């Protein structure tokens, strides 16, 4: 992750600034202007509802902003669209994949350690099965750690296997 790719970083920052901020604002202004001056001004029935451009903007924003917030909520919470976007991100970004897998592995390891800590805290001895579980977990983690890289699909295969368990 050196800074020798400064031009690509600049290109990425430019595209992000353009699409997230500049193009969004210009598109909103363009849509409001075009719809009012090409559509509403030419139809007297619409002109009576929206007598001026300023009133049109106030009405559209007061209806449009809550409507778009609702559509955004539906996108994230009620459809498969966002889940599909995240799936594509994880499939195409090895760093995101690695973080997701590492989080899952850390969770399992921590839960096992907590189980053992609770037993020790209750003055219970760790049995052969506990030691076998730890050895198995260690062996699996070591083997997986050696086999994975950012250029192979070991992390993606791990995630797919875990998702199938659900």
Image (cartoon, grey):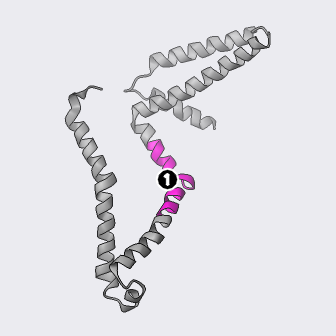
Residue lying at 26% horizontally and 25% vertically, measured from the top left: 2
Q: Which residue is mark 1?
A: 81
Q: Residue 91 sits in which quadrant?
A: top left
Q: Is residue 138 above or below residue 12?
A: above
Left or right relative to 28: residue 156: right
Left or right relative to 5: residue 104: right
Residue lying at 45% horizontally and 38% vertically, measured from the top left: 90
Q: Nearer the viewer, residue 6 or 136?
A: 6
Q: Which residues are magenta?
A: 68-88
Q: Secondary structure at mark 1?
A: helix
Q: Nearer the viewer, residue 9 or 80?
A: 9
Q: Residue 121 sits in which quadrant?
A: top right
Question: Which image quadrant: the N terminus?
Answer: top left
Q: Is residue 7 above or below residue 141?
A: below
Residue lying at 40% horizontally and 89% vertically, measured from the top left: 48
Q: Is residue 86 magenta?
A: yes
Q: Residue 7 sits in which quadrant?
A: top left
Q: Main secondary structure of the magenta part?
A: helix
Q: Position of residue 101 (x, y in %)?
A: 51, 29
Q: Position of residue 46 (x, y in %)?
A: 39, 86
């Amino acid at each position: 992750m050196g800074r020798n790719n400064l031009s690509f970083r600049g290109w990425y920052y430019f595209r992000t600034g353009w699409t997230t901020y500049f193009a969004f604002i210009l598109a909103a202004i363009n849509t409001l202007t075009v719809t009012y001056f090409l559509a509403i001004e030419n139809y007297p029935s619409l002109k009576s509802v929206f007598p001026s451009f300023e009133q049109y903007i106030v009405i559209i924003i007061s209806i449009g902003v809550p409507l778009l917030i609702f559509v955004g909520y539906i996108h994230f919470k009620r459809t498969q669209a966002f889940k599909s976007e995240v799936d594509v991100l994880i499939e195409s970004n090895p760093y995101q994949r690695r973080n997701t897998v590492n989080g899952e592995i850390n969770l399992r390891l921590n839960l096992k350690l907590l189980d053992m800590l609770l037993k020790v805290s209750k003055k219970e001895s760790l049995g052969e099965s506990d030691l076998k579980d730890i050895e198995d977990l260690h062996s699996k983690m070591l083997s997986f750690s050696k086999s994975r890289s950012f250029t192979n699909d070991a992390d993606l295969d791990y995630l797919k296997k875990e998702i199938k368990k659900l």
